[in-house]
Amino acid sequence: MRPGRIAAVALTALVGIALAGCAAAAPAATAAPASLTVSDAWAKAAGASEMTAAFGVLHNDTDADIRVTAASTPASTSTQLHQTTANAAGEMVMSEVKDGFVVPAHGTFPLEPGGNHIMLMGLTSALVAGDEVTITLTLDGGEPVEVRAPVKDYAGGNEQYEGTGEPSHGSGH
């Protein structure tokens, strides 16, 4: 082999080794954003300016807990994450969950009438059975998750707001 040819082969080998070393030293790719899915989503029918709620099952297929910190929808002027609990008198009352809902790693978190739910207050127009409402869930440190929930008629529980004694949105959610 000629000296120039040997130098070219050696240089090519050194460049290859250097590039392989850089690739090995490169930082690992960042983890994908939190993955949350929703099944069986639905919202209770209600009139304009009234309150209603949305339900479903939140699914977390990741190795870490996911916290839902907020919800929003163009269908209402205010949207909150709510829980329903018994007060001292044994009445079921609703209250905002300020710290959000935690969906456990590889687990689920049910949103259901008489339990945890997404409260839609000050509806911008009536939600009629057969309609669909879009709700955006905000995750702690993750991308927003858009949920499409069909609207259904439902005559369920008669929860109350803590401290008001007023029934929540008519026949409950």
Image: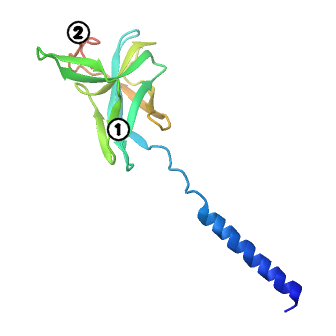
Name the secondary structure under disc 1: strand
Q: Could you tell me residue 66's position as x and y percent?
A: 38, 40
Which residue carries the number 2 mark? 163
Q: In which quarter of the image is residue 67?
A: top left
* Left or right: where 56 falls relative to 18: left
> Does label 1 or label 2 sit earlier along the sequence?
1
Q: Is 16 or 64 nearer to us in this picture? A: 16
Q: Nearer the viewer, residue 45 or 112?
A: 112
Quadrant containing the C terminus is top left
Q: Quadrant of residue 3?
A: bottom right
**By what rule are the colours in the image chosen?**
rainbow
Question: Which disc number belongs to residue 69?
Answer: none
- Work out whether 146 lies above or below 4: above
User: Horizontal and vertical percent for residue 8?
Assistant: 83, 80
Which three-letter amino acid code belongs to the residue tagged 2?
Gly
Question: At 39% from the left edge and 49% from the top edge, which residue is drawn?
Answer: 62
Residue 58: mark: 1
Element at label 2: loop
Residue pictured at 60% horizontal, 63% vertical: 25
Q: Which of 99 and 101 is in front in this view?
A: 99
Give the alpha-carbon distance from disc 1 to disc 2, as whole Å: 29 Å
Give 8 or 89, whichever is nearer the viewer: 8
Q: Residue furthest left?
A: 89
